[in-house]
Amino acid sequence: MSAWGKVAVAGVYEHPTRFAPDKTAYQLHVESARGALADAGLAIGDVDAFFTSGVGPIGILSLAQHLNLRPCHVDSQAIGGSSFVSHCLHAAAAIAGGLCEVALVTYGSTAASERFAIGTGGGGLGDPPDHFEVPFGPTIVGSYALVAQRHMHEYGTTSEQLAEIAVTMRRHATMNPDAKYRDPITVEHVLASRVISSPLHLLDCCIISDGGGALVLTSLERARDLAKPPVVILGGAEAVQHHGIGRRDLLEIAAGQSGPLALARAGVTHADVDCCMIYDSYTITVLATLEALGFCAPGEGGAFCAGGRIGLGGALPINTDGGGLSSNHPGMRGMFLVIEATKQLRGERGAMQVPDAEIALVHGTGGMLGQRHSGVTMILGRP
Amino acid sequence: MTESKTERPYRKPLPRVDEESRGYWEALQRHELYFQRCRDCGTNRFPPRAVCPVCLSSSTGWVRASGTGTVHSFTVTYQNQAPGFRDELPYVLAVVELAEGPRLMTNIVDCAPDAVRIGMAVEVVFDDVTPEVTLAKFRPAA
């Protein structure tokens, strides 16, 4: 029994706020849920499965109260920013397997108004492996920087090549009225911005914003009768990458496992993919993920992203909303990857529209690329 | 292998010493660097843990590392708001590959941050950060 091709994203909503100092994260969750249900043409009473993340170990219980939900299926997957992509795969399996019929996935965060230092805080001594790392001061930026430095060493990747990714994301953001940063930037701007953790500059790093979003998923059969054209989950896969017993290659990332499996399960090839939404926590994340997914060979990511090839009008448009580098990043961006891919496949994006987009690849990364991280790849398509 | 002095009070996070990791941390206090080797299947492992994840044996041996290695990757950290680290910017976070194979996260010390390179030969330096805890850091090899 397979879930692929049977479950659809029926409703999406991205909260337009980027700074909401007087709102709680819960309010953003609920306003986003209302938006996604309206988009689908469903009522909150239709929801029988609830998915969220970033709310603490049993926070889903409190959030269910805030929404007055009485679900028969709950999932507060916690694998970092990719969790919301994972929720879609889990919801597909649950719906196809008869556990539930209408899944609501929500996200909300006030990271910016709480002045939360996401990337440059110290990190906590939580789990046993942390005790061999945190005493030396790995920030989140620093963890990704270790991968960038190694990539430069092995393949000659340059800061200019990484900068071009940030420039392309900003070009997309100039067309997105909701994006937090909309002034065009150049490679020179990126290279002139201060170094946070070498070789990554400020403008190689995602922004910090407030925000929220929500998704509604149901069977393709039911989605056909709802308000918007359904977008089908064609396939997907998850992966976890870590140091194992102590000899990990920093350039081997989770996308190398989840990407090929997701494409095979969907029955599509790289050439079939019209656009990608790739978690752009840092410029290196995009480059390393594209290589690991197999869109180009290891070491060719810099050239692959050059000359506007990953921009609108290019060979493979990526993060058409401006991504986490320019549009929004409340800490866990997986939610927005699914929303943007869905809007592209519905043909709703106006100036940001990829012409005739039929297949989109979504890849979320959670955790830290240079330490432990998750990767979740999902292939979406028109029915 | 000399000590590097750390100013008091020490404000960075300190590791927890427990049943799985005690042998590692106690060796560092003696200024010796060890990693584990499974007595049943012979697999080296780092960081330490009680059960070999390859064969699930609890029979654990310890191997003393020579203390030499190379920089596998590094980053010069210019921004970290956490107590202790924010007073020592910039500092070098690195992954060092020991001559015996295991890779570990560490700091490169006694070296200008801009002089650190991947592939650079390094040797361990034992930093007694508190009376109870010693950290294995690395400096350019003599």
Image (cartoon, grey):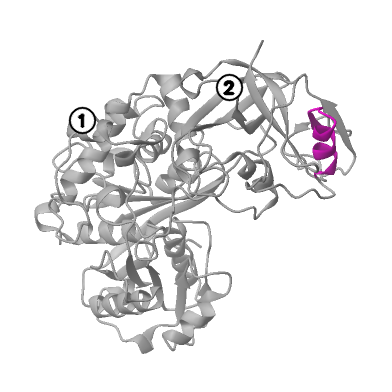
- Picture quadrant of residue A108: bottom left
Viewer-proximal residue, A241 or B62? B62
Residue at x 47%, y 31% (from the top left corner): B76
Residue at x 39%, y 60% (from the top left corner): A115
Kindly identify which residue carries mark 2: B71
Look at the image and say whether residue B30 sits in the magenta stretch: yes
Which residue is outermost to the top? B142
Q: Is residue B37 visible?
A: no
Which residue is outermost to the front? B8
Chain letter for mark 1, please. Answer: A
Report the amino acid beneath label 2.
Val
Viewer-proximal residue, B99 or A35? B99
Report the amino acid beneath label 1.
Glu
Quarter of the figure that contains the C terminus of chain A = bottom left
Viewer-proximal residue, A283 or A190? A190
Rounded to the nearest angstrom, the CA distance separating label 2 from label 1 is: 30 Å
Look at the image and say whether residue A279 sits in the magenta stretch: no
Q: Secondary structure at mark 2?
A: strand
Q: How many marks?
A: 2
Q: Is residue A324 visible?
A: yes
Which residues make up the magenta segment?
B21-37
Q: Secondary structure at mark 1?
A: helix
Label 1 crowding class (10 Å Cα cut-off): few <14, some 14-19, many 20+? few
Which residue is outermost to the left? A351
Chain letter for mark 2, please. Answer: B
Residue at x 34%, y 74% (from the top left corner): A28
Kindly identify which residue carries mark 1: A188
- Picture quadrant of residue A203: top left
- Residue B116 is situated, as x and y percent measured from the top left of the image, at 51, 20
Q: Name the side, left or right, on which A262 lies relative to A99.
A: left
- Residue A1 is situated, as x and y percent measured from the top left of the image, at 51, 63
